[in-house]
Amino acid sequence: MVGSSAAGLATAEALRRQGYQGTLTLLGGEPHLPYDRPPLSKQVLAGTWEPDRTQLRPTAALDALNAEFIQDDRATGLDLPTRTIRTASGRALHAEAIVVATGVAPRRLSGQDELSGVHVLRTLADASALRTDLLTCRRLVVVGEGVLGSEIAATARGMGVQVTMAGPQTAPMATQFGPAMASLLGNLHLERGVVLRLGTGVDGLVGRDGRVSGVRLASGEVLPADVVVVAIGSIPATAWLADSGLEIQNGLVCDSRCRAGDGIYGVGDVARWQHQTLDVLMRLENRTNATEQAAAVAANILGAELPYCPVPYFWTDQFDAKIQAHGVLPAGAEMTVVEGDAAARRFVALFHRGGRVTGVIGWNMPKQTRQHRQEVVDALAPLAPAHA
């Protein structure tokens, strides 16, 4: 496994559960044992969890895997004919099967590395550095209105920091949720004191004496800041595969079995695979997919030859809102509340397009949301090829 975070670890565990008794090696680019990333923008950043609590498994459970963990040594290349991975430290690792689970890297603004006080959030080290700055800052600007930016804004506001969110979309998570849901989420942020400067792009950063002092919008206006978080999306971590001969296009391109080449598989955020039911190339950046795809990859490594056709799922926690989404929420879909009350922020809504249910979303109604998920499953079933 190239990558020892959630997807890499889950693949190793699934292989053992399914009877594989051979050698397992997990190569990780960070110094930590496998840990969970979703708490970084919430519990770890807020200080309600110590960083050690994010470790995915107790040390005894990792020992029981009978696997070799190589930490703090990133992959730098792959020789495809011999299935040999080269690493930054000079290692050459040979394998009968290679699972690429290298995840993603945060996108960055031009010039951000030249100023202190500018952060991204992907790793434990990132979360620790950002928390240290937030504890002494007064004004935070979050550049980015997606899932991560919205969660960071909510967490920082709960810490008492003055927060401004900036980005080109008209409301938080508008790309993920569509206008109606995003408007509800925007109202929640406004009520909790987050200043929304949305609908305008960000032109760059402003600094003074080597430290960030503001964010310049495309309009020319400068938003004052003591600290800035850049949360403008991620790039699949595939640079090390550039000369491998594998197809790289917004991730490691895989077939419906998550296979990128002979004996090469992709799993987690980095994998862009053919979703056989929806007949699209899909790449999902969420914790649930990492675990589910790992189980499918493990089975296929062992000869199952099964397509991976999940119902996409993600969740987000912001302030007191727990929001779950199953299926696809396409642009232009019609949203219908089927349980609860949107005004009370406790409801379930179905998304329809072309007369077909495509997705379901729930706000503070997790049990009911899971129940309505079956409607999404039923709607997708007629799309499945007969041989799937």
Image (tube, rainbow, N blue to C red):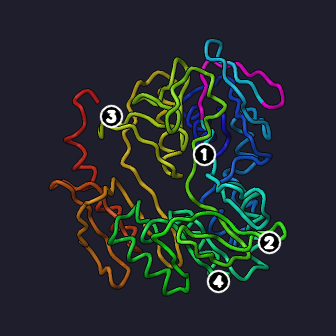
Q: Residue at x 65, y 13 (%)?
A: 82
Tell me: residue 266, above or below residue 263: below
Q: Which residue is drawn at 38% across and 31% down?
A: 307
Identify residue for label 3: 276
Please report whichever mark, 1 or 2, sits nearer to the chain's N-terminal start.
1
Query: Distance between the Cα atoms at labels 1 and 2?
Result: 31 Å
Identify residue for label 4: 162
- Asked if the residues shown at circle 4 and circle 1 are in contact, with their CB atoms under 8 angstroms apart, the answer is no
Tag 1 secondary structure: strand
Identify residue for label 1: 104
Q: Which amino acid does label 3 sit on?
A: Gln
Q: How many C-alpha atoms fall within 10 Å of the one at disc 3: few (<14), some, or many (≥20)?
A: many
Q: How many C-alpha atoms fall within 10 Å of the one at disc 2: few (<14), some, or many (≥20)?
A: few
Image position, residue 126 (x, y; %): 73, 59
* Location of residue 205 by image quarter: bottom right
- Asked if the residues shown at circle 1 and circle 3 are in contact, with their CB atoms under 8 angstroms apart, the answer is no
Tag 4 secondary structure: strand
Q: How many C-alpha atoms fall within 10 Å of the one at disc 1: few (<14), some, or many (≥20)?
A: some
Front: mark 4 or 1: 4
Query: Distance between the Cα atoms at labels 2 and 4?
Result: 20 Å
Identify residue for label 2: 208
Is residue 125 toward the left or the right of residue 81 in the image?
right
Q: Residue at x 41, y 60 (%)?
A: 176
Q: Is 179 part of what is drawn in magenta?
A: no
Q: Nearer the viewer, residue 171 or 201?
A: 201
The outermost residue toward the top is 81
Q: Which amino acid does label 1 sit on?
A: Val
Front: mark 2 or 4: 2
- Asked if the residues shown at circle 1 and circle 2 are in contact, with their CB atoms under 8 angstroms apart, the answer is no
Span shown in magenta? 88-100
Query: Distance between the Cα atoms at labels 1 and 3?
Result: 24 Å
Quarter of the figure with the N terminus: top right
